[in-house]
Amino acid sequence: MGPTSSVEVPRNAYVVDATGKTIMPGIIDVHAHTSSFGFGLMPQKHWPFYANLAYGVTTAHDPSANSQTVFGMAEMIRAGEMVGPRLFSTGIILYGADGDFKAVINSLDDARSAIRRTKAFGAFSVKSYNQPRRDQRQQVIQAAREYEMLVVPEGGSTFFHNMSMIMDGHTTIEHNIPVAPLYKDVIELWSHSKTHYVPTLIVNYGGLNGEYFFYQRDNVWENEKQLKYYPRGAIDSRSRHRTMVPDEEYENGHILVAQGAKKLSDAGVKVNLGAHGQLQGLGAHWELWMMGQGGMTNMEALKTATINGAIMLGMEDQIGTLEVGKLADLIVLDKNPLDDLENSETVRYTMVNGRLYDTETMNEIGNTEKERSKFPWEISPYSPGFDWHEVMDVHCSCGE
């Protein structure tokens, strides 16, 4: 990287003509459920990964997944045996409510045991989910500090739970706080912490999910690029039978919450993009555009999708901006998102860790050329793709 006059390009370099296009860092989705459950099966070719790469998501953090599956996939991606975004995860959550996988934490030693096990799986973060007492949450945080782990929490859409999680010192608040609009008390408290905010407007608390806005506005089932990397049945079931409501439902819903995210951002709180796996690939752009609906400038919104997420993950020296010495994650857009935020979806090429993909085909090009093989539904209409939402309907009703 650098001025043409000072950068020496190797003779055998693969050259891409990007005249008139826009180059930006790859998108970082810090709340990305990547369908990493699989009932003990680990597909070598996982379509949600292709969908995300095709739309420019180069780093994903999954805050709830099957530990065997997600860490196995992450290792296979690193080894070049799978195609996908750089993948991080909490693995199985530390769930505090009664259930078949409750994490019982009543002492610091309990928390140490849980986090030591999670780290051994391959996690660098843990999800403290619905631990009901503050001392339990603080024990998780203390143990995480000792083992150098991030702690991302979820509070079951409870306002006072969220506020105390900020005071406890969590890395983030996952999902939007269920109060809007925000006033000075919340903004002042949050601004004096280092806790990031991942509002996941796409699954908004306290109003209609933001994703419904785009199902209502757009004929998603006709999006040809999305359909290349997403099974038809999963698209149709979520987009054709759509909820139609007056616009004010959204103005008093996810847009009002997004305005709160803008206020927090103005006060110095790092706001991050998290698309929750609602629609692999395109959903990350919906989340980005909703930041703009709340009043963020195009550049502010783009920071939620890039450098802010890198800071939250503790990886700002490796990803999040385009600089000499950082990992080669970038996307090439046909149009400039600084002119119109919705230009962000015009991703033509995605480079992840130096590997370049043509998003029209998801063939690898450049110094290594590898044609993408067919997805099951391209071979047979009776081979549906695996879908995150189907699994969650089977396993839990916890709003994960």
Image (cartoon, grey):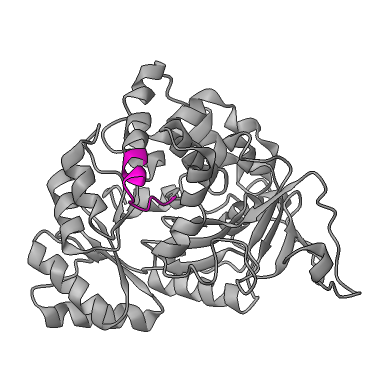
Q: Nearer the viewer, residue 256 or 338?
A: 338
Instruction: Describe residue 357's horizontal placement relative to residue 286 as left or right.
Output: right
Instruction: Describe residue 176's horizontal placement relative to residue 122 as left or right.
Output: left
Instruction: Describe residue 92's horizontal placement relative to residue 82 as left or right.
Output: left
What residue is shown at x 57% (from left), y 52% (from top)?
Answer: 385
Residue 197 coordinates in the image, percent (x, y): 33, 51
Instruction: Describe residue 209's horizontal placement relative to residue 236 as left or right.
Output: left
Look at the picture and state if 213 lies above or below 248.
Answer: below
What residue is shown at x 26% (from left), y 50% (from top)?
Answer: 398
Q: Is residue 265 magenta?
A: yes
Residue 195 coordinates in the image, percent (x, y): 28, 58
* Residue 371 visible somewhere in the drawing: yes
Rendered-image quadrant of the N terminus:
bottom right
Residue 145 coordinates in the image, percent (x, y): 25, 78
Q: Which residues are magenta?
A: 262-273
Look at the picture and state if 128 lies above or below 259.
Answer: below
